[in-house]
Amino acid sequence: MVVDTGWLTEHIRDVPDFPLAGVMFKDITPLLGDGEALKFVVDTMADHFAGLGVEKVLGIEARGFIVAAPVAYRLGAGFVPVRKAGKLPWRVETEEYALEYGTDRLQIHADALRPGERVLVIDDVLATGGTASACARLVEKLGAKVAGLGFVIELEFLNGRSRVEAYDAMALLTYG
Ligand code: AMP
């Protein structure tokens, strides 16, 4: 079923030159602050990945958490945080990744996923794909399987999809 998501654009704020000159930041806080839009995003994403037997939903710090947790609830799955290096208290696995603006490291608790578990990865924006592909590698390092990747926004001109083409990746809104 094709779902009309275009109306969500009125809840996305474009912030030029944040956090660096030349970056057009897609601010989803107006969307998160609107009950109808937030419910629509969570329900549409959960519906898209329903039936795949998702057992864990992995949210990427920090905006990814906000969508991933209610999607996990809707799917009857667990929620797993992936965080910037040094934030998780337990034993971790680490992956390096490149952002649209800079590089960093992401970590997951080493015991957060069981081998063979089906995992849905969620973030707010797919830009260059560095973050999402690092998360997919973390999932696979723990022996689990990426069941899909879900984003509120895809910045198509940054071609992030090419870095996650091995997976079922969906975005609610695409900016060309
Ligand atoms: P990337 O690794 O290049 O795909 O970048 C994706 C990550 O960086 C996501 O966690 C986003 O929250 C953030 N991000 C990158 N570019 C933007 C942007 N233009 N607007 C908002 N968030 C962005």
Image: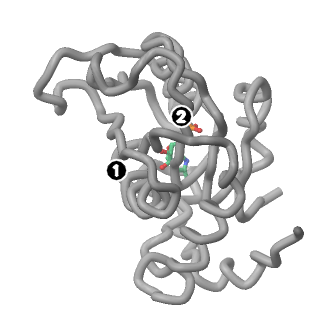
Q: Residue at x 73, y 64 (%)?
A: 173
Q: Position of residue 68 (x, y in %)?
A: 45, 54
Q: Residue at x 53, y 47 (%)?
A: 122
Residue ranking furthest to the left: 89
In the image, is 152 to the left or to the right of 169?
left
Question: Is 90 above or below relative to 26?
Answer: above
In the image, is 68 to the left or to the right of 47?
left
Q: Position of residue 130 (x, y in %)?
A: 57, 28
Residue ranking furthest to the right: 2
Q: Check residue 62 in the rendering and tell me which mark sits there, or answer none.
A: 1
Pointer 1: residues within 10 angstroms few (<14), some, or many (20+)?
some
Q: Residue at x 66, y 79 (%)?
A: 8
Local secondary structure at mark 1: loop
How many marks the image carries: the answer is: 2
Q: Position of residue 54 (x, y in %)?
A: 56, 42
Dot 2 beta carbon under 8 Å from ligand 1: no
CA gap, disc 2 and disc 1: 18 Å
Question: Is 65 above or below relative to 15?
Answer: above
Local secondary structure at mark 2: strand
In the image, is 67 to the left or to the right of 151?
left
Quadrant of the image occupied by residue 88:
top left
